[in-house]
Amino acid sequence: MELLLILAAIAAFCQTTVNAQYGRKQFPGQPPYRPFPPYRSWPHKRPSPPPPTNKQPVYPQLKTTPQILGLANDPALDRDSCGSMTFLDRTFWTCRDTQLFYPNGSVMISPLITSTASWSDFNRFGAPALQQLPPGADPINSTVLKLYGKNTINQAFYPILPNYCDPPAGNCSDGTRYALWPDLPPMITSSGRGGVTGYTWIRTSHIRSDLSTVTDNPNAILYKVTYQGSSFGNKNALPKVSVVDEFFWKEGEITFGNYGNVVKDGIAYLYGLAEGITSLAKVPANQVENKAAYQYWVDGKWTRTMPAIGQEGINITNSNTGGGQGTYYFSEQWNSYVWVGGPVTPGSDMYITTAPDPTGPWITPQHFFTGINGNYFLSAYSIQAHPGLAASSRDNDLYVTYTKNDLDAEGINVYTSPLVYIQWK
Ligand SMILES: *[C@@H]1O[C@H](CO)[C@@H](O)[C@H](O)[C@H]1NC(C)=O
Ligand SMILES: *[C@@H]1O[C@H](CO)[C@@H](O)[C@H](O)[C@H]1NC(C)=O
Ligand SMILES: *[C@@H]1O[C@H](CO)[C@@H](O)[C@H](O)[C@H]1NC(C)=O
Ligand SMILES: *[C@@H]1O[C@H](CO)[C@@H](O)[C@H](O)[C@H]1NC(C)=O
């Protein structure tokens, strides 16, 4: 209830802003004004905070108890591990393994699509277009934010290349699988009316049916995601994906950018995780494809020599829970780098840590919420922050999802993505 009041207050405030900015009159019977394109062109970035006066870390504190609003879902798809980026006028989501439903609601075993993508909309006030749940509905079992978009069943969103067995699952005749899972949404390096460019590094994980790995530190493919904007006719069309380099990170190298990434002031900061150690590289955001432009944080300074896995002096201490899945982003409100994510072991415990600089010092990760776990032994994971969903909010708020993993009556995994709303002081 309180949330609705708050959303209503934001809505009322933003409506005033929109009307003032566009000098638009509402006439009786006229549908609410929807500036297009893009209808989020009114200032959805709050004025820049003053430059940092000190480099003290921020210790986040909750303002209200986090709330599960419902599911962020394409109701037609059973999908694992979704993350998002907001650009132009919508939020773009990528997910890992995706299956379809039979008309009776059971999950189909095949096809298994290693990655799919979606859009979600904003309402005219710049808030996520949340649907009202039916009276008495259980939020853990009801779609509150509808995801949509045109996927295919023949190929994954990030295409399975010829060396990685059969699309769209990456399944091999010996029973193993190349699971080309996107662990994160694309890192957006440029976005404007001329188009959007983003990048995703995908580890070529070669796994057995028990999820054990055939290769410990496989090569990572660098995919490029481009999008030219939508028009009314093709809202369902998804961005295009191409391959920059199948061996961008070679076998045995740290796969920087795959564990986390954040673009700030034209620099892409790329986190890598290997042997439980988090390390960091940086590159100008417009030179992601140029390996020679990369620098690495070693022994407290930037160097052009790529460190080896396990090398001393590369650990970015406290920048996460020691390897749990999560999201790095920059918070304007705190003028800080932030990581929100989960523990290394399964579960929906959520942690946050902040730092004034991508290299640190990071505060000890703090626990702030526990969601509802699924009944499968991998009960919950893939905690992902969606800072773009709240980009136009004047509050210090954040949306987070996680994957809840349940087994259905036939013993097939059903994945859902509860959407959690968080307000910070
Ligand atoms: C739903 O239909 C599929 C395909 O016909 C079938 O295999 C499955 O057992 C059905 N599930 C239920 C719960 O009836
Ligand atoms: C979720 O909702 C669907 C459709 O209303 C229903 O069939 C299903 O039993 C519900 N599941 C749970 C766990 O409540
Ligand atoms: C992969 O799975 C599909 C669908 O289940 C099957 O048709 C195909 O033969 C499999 N490919 C391999 C190499 O086993
Ligand atoms: C790296 O830092 C983490 C804390 O973030 C710590 O738990 C871990 O032991 C460190 N590893 C090494 C090899 O120093």
Image (cartoon, rainbow, N blue to C red):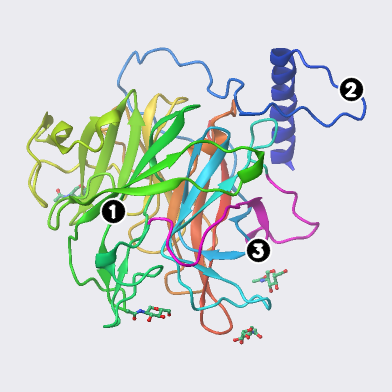
The residue under label 1 is which amino acid type?
Gly
In the drawing, does residue 118 fall left or right of residue 97?
Answer: right
Q: Quadrant of ligand 2?
A: bottom right
Instruction: Look at mark 3 in the image and give the residue it sits on.
Output: 141
Are there few (<14), some (14-19), or many (20+) residues within 10 Å of tag 2? few
Q: Residue at x 58, y 34 (%)?
A: 89
The residue under label 2 is which amino acid type?
Phe
Quarter placement of the N terminus: top right
Residue 323 disc label: 1
Residue mark closest to the camera, 2 vs 1: 2
Residue 180 in picture, x, y percent from top left: 33, 61
Give the farthest residue toward the front: 233
Distance Cα–Cα, label 2 vs label 1: 55 Å
Magenta segment range?
A: 130-158
Task: Look at the image and say whether residue 71 sits in the magenta stretch.
Answer: no
Residue mark closest to the camera, 2 vs 3: 2
Q: Are marks 1 and 3 in contact (CB under 8 Å)?
A: no
Q: Quadrant of residue 346?
A: bottom left
In the drawing, does residue 330 fall left or right of residue 411?
Answer: left
Residue 159 in picture, x, y percent from top left: 37, 58
